[in-house]
Image: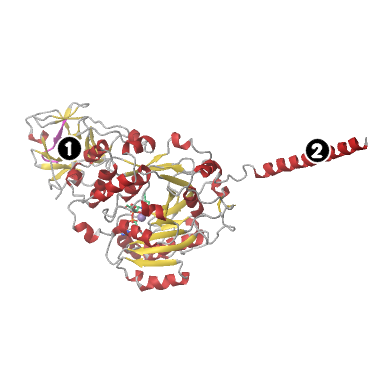
Amino acid sequence: MAASLLLGRKSRNIRIIALFCLIFLILYFMITYDKVPKYDSPRSAKLLVSKERPKLVSGLGNFEPKEIEDRDGPGEKGEPYHLKQEQQNDADQSESEYGMNVACSDEISLDRTILDTRLEECKHWDYPVNLPTTSVIIVFHNEGWSVLLRTVHSVLNRSPKHMLKEILLVDDFSDKDNLKSKLEDYIEQFNGKVRLIRNHQREGLIRTRSRGAQEATGDVIVFLDAHCEVNTNWLPPLLAPIYYDRTTMTVPVIDGIDHKTFEYRPVYGDDRHFRGIFEWGMLYKENEVPQRELSTRKHHSEPYKSPTHAGGLFAMDRRYFLELGAYDPGLLVWGGENFELSFKIWQCGGSIEWVPCSRVGHVYRSFMPYNFGKLAQKKKGPLITINYKRVIETWFDDKYKEFFYTREPMARYLDMGDISEQLALKERLNCKSFQWFMDNVAYDVLEKYPELPPNLHFGELRNVGSTKCLDTSGHGPPALMGVQHCHGYGNNQLMRLNAKGQLGVGERCVEADGQGVKLAFCRLGTNDGPWLYDENTHTILHRVHEKCMALHPQTAHLSLMLCDINNAYQQWLFKEIRPK
Ligand code: LR7
Ligand code: MN
């Protein structure tokens, strides 16, 4: 009896303890469940399988600033700042020198506050506390003082101290006085946290970045242009995916900083995400992220995969960048390096993720204020196209190379130098084909920019009556086309007519209506057009209007006229041209 009583009491005690435990557990889950999305939760499965993962997370942290930054003054909160009337001269002068209003920037604090453009959700993610240390690398050539230093200050102000190993400034042979000893003196206040190294000759931004990566000491390198401002808690979300997988490149979402007023504002709205793609002339484009990619994620603010990136702003494991051979050292000065690195990463087993919770502002200049220096003078033909040619000859399959040459017909004749090292690297790293990349990563490219039918003709298009050539005169669409003296350099006179009747200049199309012959945006997703060139009579028929392209002998206006094969002003000759 006593024993059973004891047992009964004992089991009641156990039941009470179990009940307490249950209540405690329920309370615990109620408090913690989904209150903060844990950054690693959607990835934890990945965390268990990969051999390369670092030791288990030692804990999670949120890294949100404790206090909200609040200040008043010119340009604070990222608002536009307008100079006084009497400063207009300085403004104009600095705009022509730098492609941006450095006089306006000079009036704004280097520590100014900016609009927090992140999605609300971003404030609630947790990240591993032991994220890798970072070198932020800023390469620059003749940048404006306050613009460069605001980039530096923003990184120092908005990065967790223990994650930021250093800011490495790499001067690409600037000749502005204030970027000499004054800059060295200025950065002394940061006690070694900001380092400066200099090129002894102009190398261009591509080689300069590779050098920065060599010299950096952090585990991860983050590249920024020298006219950026990083936003609240920008760094941990860039580092976390790299921490989990060192072959991931991460890219912040880029906000705009106005080149006249330094207003800081988002480029896209909150509800939609964009990612980097390209058209076949290798112009960089951004496209709304396809559902196929979006649906792999649980939260709107989570990173998503992207075929490529704009080039300037990204984070990578430093050793991984170097294992991939850094940038192809044969790429000169500016352009194409974003594609080279992107194709290399994807095809050789890595990935690229855009990170909505990491926002960085960038000043989009009004024009490029520098020339390409001696490196470009040694080259025959446009340097950027030569860079593209190296990239596509290394990474594209034959079928896709043809699309590039169809869109950029003169590129076939450019000397791209030796790419055997690049091909050997591709072999050594056992990289996948471009077709694999198109099928699995860049599957949205062909929807926008379909396969290009071969050109029937390319070159300048000379009007027989006037002996002048069809020319865009440098106008963007929509604009009337005109004729100019034939110069043989291509550019605005480089026409191409494809087998499906599309007449184009660069990425644009030539179309016609009642007003005349026009330069227009090619319709996305199409590769055809209305034109039919008659090889015998040399007329160009518009098949829809059933009229021919004609030049008015007196007004030089281009229009569609009833076809008259004997009228020399309706006869056109294609003349192939070569790089000069
Ligand atoms: O010879 C040079 N040496 C340099 O060190 C020329 C430039 N630079 C520096 C320059 O000072 C700047 O800090 O390199 C950086 C980038 O040059 P920008 O700002 O003139 O380039 P961009 O912003 O016009 O162009 C974009 O494409 C380039 C192609 O090579 C680079 O990848 C840029 O980093 C890139 N910028 C961005 O991706 C920011 C977002 C723009 C978009 C879309
Ligand atoms: Mn830039």
| Residue at horizontal 25 percent and vertical 58 percent from the top | 372
Is residue 163 something one can see in this rendering? Answer: yes
Q: Mark 1: which amino acid?
A: Leu
Is the residue 208 above or below the residue 9 in the image?
A: below
Upstream in sequence: badge 1 or badge 2: 2
Q: Position of residue 151 (x, y in %)?
A: 43, 61
Quarter of the image with the N terminus is top right
Q: Give the magenta-colored segment's residue range.
A: 548-558
SS category of the residue bearing label 1: strand
Q: Position of residue 455 (x, y in %)?
A: 19, 35
> Label 2 neighbourhood size at 10 Å, few (<14), some (14-19), many (20+)?
few
Give the residue number, with chain letter if any, for mark 1.
Answer: 558
Q: Position of residue 299 (x, y in %)?
A: 53, 40
Q: Nearer the viewer, residue 117 or 38?
A: 38
SS category of the residue bearing label 2: helix
> As drawn, which residue projects farthest toward the right?
1
Q: Ligand 1 sits in which quadrant?
A: bottom left
Decide if residue 55 is on the left or right side of residue 29.
left
Decide if residue 492 is on the left or right side of residue 176.
left
Give the residue number, with chain letter if any, for mark 2.
Answer: 15
Q: Mark 2: which amino acid?
A: Arg
Image colouring: secondary structure
